[in-house]
Image (cartoon, coloured by chain):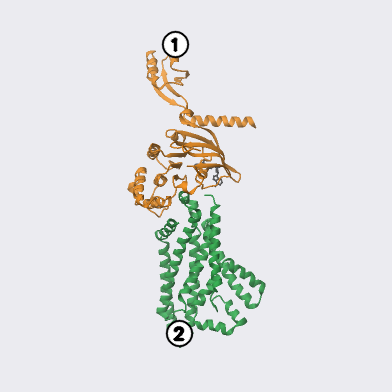
Chain colours: A green, B orange
């Protein structure tokens, strides 16, 4: 398995996948810095007060995080989607699997290698982005580390499902399905929030089911919660009740982070999907 | 199953939905032999190798390779494999591909360097060891594939169409390599549709067609007797009778054929013809080729089938 992990990492470096990601991040961070500096300049000239600026900056940061989570999730999906199928199709795996290597070791090695890449990239990009924001606006979110960790968690969830699909489907099909799943799960999150606010229990439970099938939404709320200044979370709590639910229906607000039970669920979900991937690949003829 | 057996199968079968890729393969490959598994495209050769390696699951029958059931992890340490569809990680250097396979095969790391340089030498890729596999021609990739198959001193090597991408020089190299392996006691399972190629290196062959073995045996038994064809002009019937003592004679225009014939008597045959006033234009020693045998067997099969229906 160690060999497979190493091969996966070497491939990412040699094929310049990592460098492309890092280049993209630098560009985004520079654009952010420029955008923030223009914004703050103009806000201060118009006499907007500091709390308002802080809320504004945090909202823009959340929007950026959303964009980043999208890019990250798609990158993870497209790293995972061809990870098994392309080597089955090309024939690279014929020689590899004739070695004393279990199919489970191949799947886990691949997944672990890609997960390392995704997490490392998220960490680097997150630090970079938050660092630039802090430099320009002097705003540092209350919980920067969990914010980035939840983003990485989302990417891992998509990576895992894409590896599962890759044991059976060609890379393009698996990637496309992941995009659709990502979209659906995001919508389910929004719809679920609205349904709760409007008190529509049937819709809410349907949407909730979708949220657990692909646990992205809760992690996203975790990112949002960790990026908000405490004043916003406080606002949500103050409004309370239905009003609080209405706030939580907005995908860019959160009144609380994910519960530990939910995080445990996500971990079990990842393990179960990986188990399914191993099961599926064992049955595959190459 | 004894220690002298490398591969043994009983009624090993594989069906893909409607396609019967392999219909009950029963065979024994003794250790240290070069075994040719021959047949036209689509006969089931690749399927058989994948079953023997545990890459595909049989739909019937059993098999044993090196004393272990098919696909056994420990036995795989002692098996080398060149797939028909040979492809290696294009972003790695040739040496790195070999190192990765050493690691996967469980070769102790202090022996990697020696192993790698010796297999590179054997397939003639020493000069290109530091190049990316992506820059290799198909023929070089196939050589690399053979090198991968030879890592870790395997006891059995499966070569699936090992010369498909090679030029005539490369083919000769592969034949030399197979001889080398046999000298070192390695069992070679050679898949090929090039019958002419294989008859020069194999001890034993099985000929398969549409998933069934139509004949199996030692190659000298299958090939049968030698013959000689001679083109002669100005040769009269009386002298022809004098050739009878060398073997049964047939005449087609200017061509005389004697089959079977002792190889040593060919010069005497020519001398007899010349002494009888004949002018010799060409002498072609011959042997039934595997291809002849194969085509003849196919015709018999088809005739049998036609008779049945
Ligand atoms: N994965 C597969 N799915 C369906 N049919 C297959 C598959 N692999 C091989 N076959 C069929 O099995 C038969 C034998 O194929 P193969 O073993 O590749 O033959 P050979 O190697 O002798 O050319 C062919 O008819 C082929 O189409
Ligand atoms: Mg074949």
Residue closer to the observer: A148 or B66: B66
> In the structure shown, which secondary structural element does the residue marked by tag 2 occupy?
helix
Callout 2 crowding tier (Cα within 10 Å): few <14, some 14–19, many ≥20: some
- The image shows residue A157 at horizontal and vertical percentages of 52, 65
Identify residue for label 1. Answer: B238
Identity of the residue furthest to the left in this view = B127
Q: Which mark is residue A166?
A: none
Q: Residue at x 47, y 48 (%)?
A: B74
Left or right: A166 as drawn, with respect to A22: right
Tell me the subunit letter for badge 1. B
Residue closer to the observer: B249 or B28: B28
- The image shows residue A210 at horizontal and vertical percentages of 60, 67
Give the quarter the ligand 1 occupies: top right
Residue closer to the observer: B50 or A191: B50
Q: Residue at x 50, y 51 (%)?
A: A89
Q: Residue at x 41, y 19 (%)?
A: B232
> In the structure shown, which secondary structural element does the residue marked by tag 1 occupy?
helix
Q: Quadrant of residue B124?
A: top left
Tell me the subunit letter for badge 2. A
Label pair 1/2, CB-CB below 8 angstroms = no
Q: Quadrant of residue A245?
A: bottom right
Identify residue for label 2. Answer: A43
Q: Is mark 2 within 8 Å of ligand 1?
A: no
As measured in the structure, the alpha-carbon distance from the residue carrying label 1 to the one carrying label 2 is 122 Å
- The image shows residue B214 at horizontal and vertical percentages of 54, 33
Q: Is residue A209 visible?
A: yes
């Amino acid at each position: 398995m160690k060999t497979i992990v190493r091969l996966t990492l070497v491939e990412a470096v040699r094929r310049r996948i990592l460098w492309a990601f890092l280049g993209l991040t630098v560009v985004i961070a520079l654009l952010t810095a420029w955008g923030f500096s223009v914004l703050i300049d103009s806000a201060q000239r118009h006499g907007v007060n500091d709390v308002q600026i802080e809320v504004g900056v945090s909202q823009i940061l959340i929007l950026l995080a959303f964009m980043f989570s999208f890019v990250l999730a798609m990158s993870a999906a497209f790293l995972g989607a061809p990870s098994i199928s392309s080597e089955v199709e090309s024939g690279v795996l014929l020689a590899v699997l004739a070695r004393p290597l279990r199919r489970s070791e191949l799947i886990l090695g691949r997944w672990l290698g890609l997960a390392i890449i995704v997490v490392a990239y998220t960490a680097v990009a997150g630090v970079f982005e938050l660092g630039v924001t802090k430099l320009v606006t002097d705003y540092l979110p209350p919980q920067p580390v969990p914010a980035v960790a939840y983003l990485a968690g989302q990417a891992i969830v998509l990576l895992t499902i894409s590896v599962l699909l890759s044991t059976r489907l060609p890379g393009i099909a698996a990637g496309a399905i992941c995009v659709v799943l990502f979209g659906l799960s995001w919508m389910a999150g929004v719809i679920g929030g609205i349904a709760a606010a409007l008190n529509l229990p049937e819709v809410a439970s349907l949407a909730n089911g979708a949220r657990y099938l692909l646990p992205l939404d809760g992690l996203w709320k975790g990112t949002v919660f960790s990026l908000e200044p405490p004043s916003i979370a406080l606002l949500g709590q103050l409004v309370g009740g239905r009003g609080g639910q209405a706030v939580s229906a907005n995908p860019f607000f959160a009144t609380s982070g994910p519960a530990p039970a939910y995080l445990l669920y996500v971990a079990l979900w990842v393990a179960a999907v990986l188990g399914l991937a191993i099961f599926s690949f064992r049955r595959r003829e190459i | 199953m004894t220690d002298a057996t490398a591969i043994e199968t009983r009624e090993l079968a594989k069906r893909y939905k409607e396609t019967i890729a392999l219909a009950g393969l029963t065979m024994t490959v003794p250790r240290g032999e070069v075994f040719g598994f021959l047949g036209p495209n689509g006969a089931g050769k690749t399927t058989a190798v994948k079953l023997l390696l545990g890459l595909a699951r049989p739909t019937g029958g059993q098999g044993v390779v090196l004393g272990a059931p098919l696909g056994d992890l420990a036995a795989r340490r002692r098996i080398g494999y060149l797939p028909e569809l040979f492809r290696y990680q294009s972003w790695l250097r040739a040496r790195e591909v070999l190192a990765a396979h050493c690691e996967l095969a469980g070769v102790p790391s202090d022996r990697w360097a020696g192993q790698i340089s010796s297999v590179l030498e054997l397939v003639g890729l020493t000069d290109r060891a530091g190049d990316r596999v992506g820059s290799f021609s198909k023929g070089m990739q196939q050589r690399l594939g053979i090198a991968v198959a030879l890592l870790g001193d395997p006891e059995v090597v499966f070569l699936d169409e090992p010369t498909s991408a090679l030029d005539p020089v490369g083919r000769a190299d592969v034949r030399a390599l197979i001889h080398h392996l046999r000298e070192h006691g390695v069992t070679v399972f050679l898949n090929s549709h090039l019958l002419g190629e294989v008859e020069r290196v194999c001890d034993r062959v099985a000929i398969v067609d549409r998933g069934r073995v139509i004949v199996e045996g030692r190659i000298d038994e299958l090939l049968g007797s030698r013959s000689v064809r001679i083109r002669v002009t100005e040769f009269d019937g009386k002298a022809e009778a004098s050739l009878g003592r060398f073997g049964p004679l047939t005449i087609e225009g200017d061509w005389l054929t004697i089959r079977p014939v002792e190889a040593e008597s060919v010069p005497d045959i020519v001398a007899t013809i010349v002494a009888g006033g004949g002018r010799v234009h060409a002498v072609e020693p011959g042997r039934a080729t595997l291809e002849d045998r194969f085509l003849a067997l196919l015709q018999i099969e088809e005739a049998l089938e036609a008779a049945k229906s």
